[in-house]
Amino acid sequence: MRALLAPLSELGEYEEIRERFARGKASVALSGCADSQKLHMIYGLSQGVRRKLIVTFNDLRAKELYEDYRFYDRNVLLYPAKDLIFFQADIHGNQLTKERIKVLRRLSEGTPLTVITTYDALMAPQPSMQEWQDHVISVGRGTVVSESDLAAALAGLGYERCDQVEATGQFSIRGGIIDIFDLTEENPYRIELWGDEVESVRSFDVLSQRSIERLESVRIYPATELILSKNELASGLKKIREEGKKQAEILRKQMKTEEAHRIETQVKELVEELLELGLSRNVVNLESYVHYFYPALSDFLDCIDNFSAGTAGRGGSCVFVEEPLRVKEHEAAEEMEFRESMSHRLEGGYLLPGQTDVLFSAKEALAKAQLPDTVFMTGLDQRLPGLAAKKKYSITGKNVNSYQNGFELLIKDLLRWKKEGYR
């Protein structure tokens, strides 16, 4: 929308930062923008960049930025952080996982994307993006499909088998008909077989069961970020058993028999549940055990880097950090709370030692984001100790109050013009 970019182009600081972006040297600090103007500036500075990461200090602020930035860019998604202390506390069912998987899917598809998140999300380790993408299942007309093999593959990707699909993350197989409700789709897929060959693929309405669209092929994305082969699962469980036994012995030597019994019981129940009920129904319980299953772990910044292509920064991606000092303070407090909680729970026999080291430090995560394509945005001009901003810029901005809803009407007109194709 040229009408939005025109005021920015009159600022010398804006043009200079854009030039630094083009040369891959945009590690700058920009002050003077009010809250309502930060996203306007981000939109302008990131023109032509395929991957944009906006990082802020807490979940509430991230949701506010997401809602506001949708005015500038419809290709924006929210990447929520996992709870660093209570890994199993997802009160919205699989909603948090669904939002995170949507982002991973869009990154793997290579489409332009703006991601808004918090530094909590950057501190949590995760398997590499390439490993996740390697498990995407493709099914098309004429391909040969084994029902048993597909069922095993879907279960390994976090899907739950049921009699009839009713919600995302489920699949069913009956009489040569395979229904799969991809975690990131609005409607499930129905795959009809003739023998072991795919005869038709279509989407359908989950309530009426009526077909919506015939398709040539579909791609089924994992319903979890933690994907384990049988060997990886067995190897990880072996490590958990061994460390559980070792930790119980340590606690008994400290005369903590109740705590020792607690950790032994917890490990035994985890192993039994995984062996009896399967990975798909227990994958959430494994989040804090991730180090036992993956010797090398990545983070979300690596996901952005590995799937970027464009003109700015590291292969077409850029990072905007809002109020970095608030980010540092918030993450330092979060990390301290995490370390204290893990220490107490380890002493009480609620955790294994490997579960206490399931995040990168706040300092490490912040340092990793300080690359040539990072812009630190602050409302007030302030010192940024420890942040590698090579140059500082300051602009003068102020909020403009609406008069008789005039500003709101202007926004509505701009959105309507954009929808109708005007520039």
Image (spheres, rainbow, N blue to C red):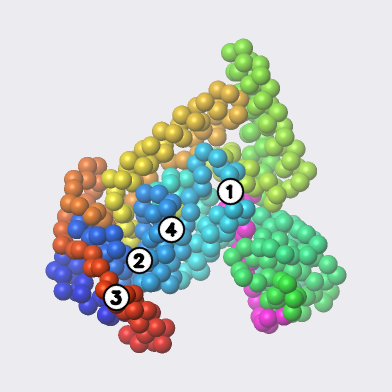
Q: Which mark is residue 316?
A: 2
Q: Nearer the viewer, mark 3 or mark 4?
A: 3
* Residue drawn 28% across the image and 80% down it: 2
* Residue drawn 43% across the image and 67% down it: 76
Q: Give the amino acid type for the residue marked by disc 2 in the picture.
A: Gly
**Crowd class of label 2 (few under 14; some 14 to 19; many from 20; radius 10 Å):** many
- C-alpha gap between disc 3 and disc 2: 42 Å
Report the number of discs: 4
Q: Give the amino acid type for the residue marked by disc 3 in the picture.
A: Gln
Q: Give the amino acid type for the residue marked by disc 4 in the picture.
A: Lys
- C-alpha gap between disc 3 and disc 1: 43 Å
Residue under circle 4?
Answer: 63
Residue under circle 1?
Answer: 90
Q: Which mark is residue 42?
A: none
Q: Which residues are magenta?
A: 211-228
Residue 5, image x, y percentages: 25, 75
Residue 256 lies in quadrant: top right
